Image (cartoon, coloured by chain):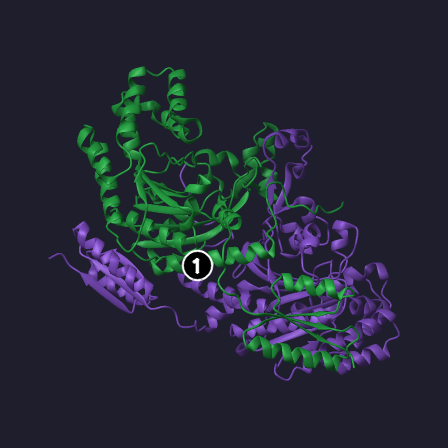
Chain colours: A green, B purple
Amino acid sequence: MSFIKKPVTGMRDILPEEMELRNYLMDTIREVYESYGFSQMEAPVVEHIENLTSKQGGDNEKLIFRIMKRGEKLAESGEALKNGDFDALTDSGLRYDLTVPLSRYYSNNQAKLQKPFKALQIGPVFRADRPQKGRFRQFVQCDIDIFGDPTNLAEKELILATTEALSRIGIDKYGLKVYINDRRILFGMVSFAGFPAEDAEKILIVLDKADKIGAEGVDEELRSMGYAEESISKLRSILDSYKGSADSVRAMGRDIDNEEIKAACENVADIMESIAAMKSRNISLCFDPKLVRGMGYYTGTIFEAKVESFGSSVCGGGRYDKMIGRFTGQDVPAVGFSIGFERIVTILLEGGCELPKQKEKLAVLMEKGMSPEKVGEIFELCEEERRKGRRVFVAWMAKNKKFQKEGLANEGYGEIREFFNN
Amino acid sequence: MSFIKKPVTGMRDILPEEMELRNYLMDTIREVYESYGFSQMEAPVVEHIENLTSKQGGDNEKLIFRIMKRGEKLAESGEALKNGDFDALTDSGLRYDLTVPLSRYYSNNQAKLQKPFKALQIGPVFRADRPQKGRFRQFVQCDIDIFGDPTNLAEKELILATTEALSRIGIDKYGLKVYINDRRILFGMVSFAGFPAEDAEKILIVLDKADKIGAEGVDEELRSMGYAEESISKLRSILDSYKGSADSVRAMGRDIDNEEIKAACENVADIMESIAAMKSRNISLCFDPKLVRGMGYYTGTIFEAKVESFGSSVCGGGRYDKMIGRFTGQDVPAVGFSIGFERIVTILLEGGCELPKQKEKLAVLMEKGMSPEKVGEIFELCEEERRKGRRVFVAWMAKNKKFQKEGLANEGYGEIREFFNN
């Protein structure tokens, strides 16, 4: 049996150069979030299969990496197998986001946590997506979540903290825009426009395609699904009439006679006005009534941040007040904002990112055959340089020394010292 | 279907307080290793099942978390299942160490990497161990490895760097001792003592139990396996006569007429003498001829670091010159030293660890019902404090304010400011 050199399908090896950027980004994001009072914690990457297949995870549930049972438990599931029941073979899987494990974590550790609990998580998640450019099956997310605050103070903090983190790592210059909506506005519009209530989810799935197929594409698809032209026009009219500013949200709340919509508009407008009032910050926050976030667990506010020049969303989040109750029987308000770390890395690698000044790098090359005593002296010298804060790389002189020195220079070794046998 | 609150069996949730310690340790270890010229990289946590089940991983191969195939590939394996062939269902698994993925990584990326390549990896590995105190199924390892240096300059660097990292995080005061041996000495002794060559691995497995069952226990077991008393005594005599100092290694090399042993003794003595010559460092490095490291892939030097007062090994490593050839057909020298991060964390949590001075923490409490304008002003104030380098936690005043303030004080909030409605 010979070994396989490439990583598993859809996953990738990270080279040292990119690792430096990633570490800088994660350290900076962590520093910013901690300054907002968020505490980093960690949950395992493996989750109970029951927690991953609750039907709330949307499309992600189809993409779970399932882990097989072991030993006796595996043997016991043999019967189920004969009926083609593969699910009986697994008891756990790799998490596909950080929200489900965090909710389990919060439910499990509530008594020991701050109130409200402001969580920071940076870690890998796993989705068995069809492999494509820029999309990997193991990727990092950076999430902040606030548990225990039913007011939109939490939303405001998440938006302030996240935009500050993105600004600090240099995303600003690519044009960062945040979009906000509310699930209650989505459901309210669909209901107000006269669509059947039980079809709301289906209709929102179509609306979610707006970025890809355009407004006409959405309307066409709704027509082809058999919905009344009147409802389609009414919905289109609402979407066109109310978007952008806090005033437009307030107008929607005034104009549309639907209790859910009125409450949600008050919520969204208030958040937008508070953010706009922050003069020391220059946050672009717009109301987007057609913003749909795929997770079924959102209950209120939803938001998304996009980088203009790249057209892709870099962060997403929302309120999910009914999640903890699924674990404990008692609901706890929860709202989070997740940074798509890999997209950020891609944007910065393509656009260029200036890392802060690194430590000086010194390379020490020794001629082969150097005596142990001489090597020892050189080692002591290196230790001294390290105490002065330099990174010191020691190696034997290569046969092709010119090539070796060029390589070192390319890697930022500003000084190369050579030691020869006497 | 209701959700499960506890983590999966054998894994655990990490609370914010421990997370701070872990971050400090990982940052410090990373800083030290980088000062030795090591470059951090990352490989996926998922590995090809072929790479994980090569028979070289020792006991770890029995403890693999296997991942099920998906979609068509899963359906296709239905036939194999009817024969009870569970293995046909999996194509990958979670890595049980960092060495196998690193070797695959090196084989896959060789052309783009420094020569010699000095790798630093910090990441989780997974073993489905029987759950027990202090042993978790997901745990972090910190490894440094050097590829492309066939000389023991690499071993010396690994020992210097690892002991420095452990010293910097405060493990020194618990009494750190490093033990060194060589697989060739192990095989050489077994052969010289007259045991059958094909039984060497079995005999070393028994020798490896010395810490648990003692010298007499080892000899007893060898007797019960049917080996000649003469061989058992001869081996015991060698183990007793040569241990501890570099001189004893040199003596073994002189006294025992076995080529493998002579070469290995020269190697080990030279490493020990170089390390002892480092006067600025005070590294306790002893020769332990009965040190056996469980992995079948070690080819030469092996080492282990122990913390006296805890009796457990905190780091382990060795040379594995034949690994890369399994991937590429061409051997590349490789040697590594792995820190058992969780053991370090346990030792420091139990013994006490002083984290360096943290940023000042300010808590801001606001009376409920505060106007959006007032909240905005308070937000601006918080931003200013953050710009000054403080961590600022904002929350509504709780009903039980006294309890709230006590909790904040316990978490290190040195200042609490309260804002009331006028």
From what the image shows, is residue A235 above or below residue B317? Answer: above
Q: Quadrant of residue B414?
A: bottom left
For the point 30% across and 66% down, the residue is B413
Q: In what quadrant of the picture does the N terminus of chain B appear? A: top left
Near mark 1 (Cα within 10 A), the count class, few <14, some 14-19 or many ≥20, is some
Quadrant containing the C terminus of chain B in the rendered view = bottom left
The answer to which of A43 and A286 lies nearer the viewer is A286
Q: In this view, does B417 lie above or below A176?
A: below
Which residue is the extreme one toward the right? Answer: B257
Which residue is situated farthest in the left direction here?
Answer: B422
Q: Can residue A313 be seen in this view?
A: no
- Furthest toward the bottom, the residue is B279
Residue topped by disc 1: A28
Q: Can residue A131 be seen in this view?
A: yes
On screen, residue A17 above or below A260: below
Q: Position of residue A190 (x, y in %)?
A: 30, 25
Provide residue B99's location: percent of width, then percent of height: 66, 57
Q: Is mark 1 on a helix, strand or loop?
A: helix
Residue toward you, A399 or B221: A399
Identified at 17% across, 56% down, the residue is: B367
Q: Position of residue B375 (x, y in %)?
A: 21, 54
**A389 relative position to A397: left or right:** left
Disc 1: which chain?
A
Q: Is residue A350 left or right of residue A240?
A: right
Left or right: A296 with respect to A264? right
Query: Which amino acid type corresponds to the residue marked 1 in the rendered image?
Result: Thr
Query: Compared to A76, does B145 lie above or below?
Result: below
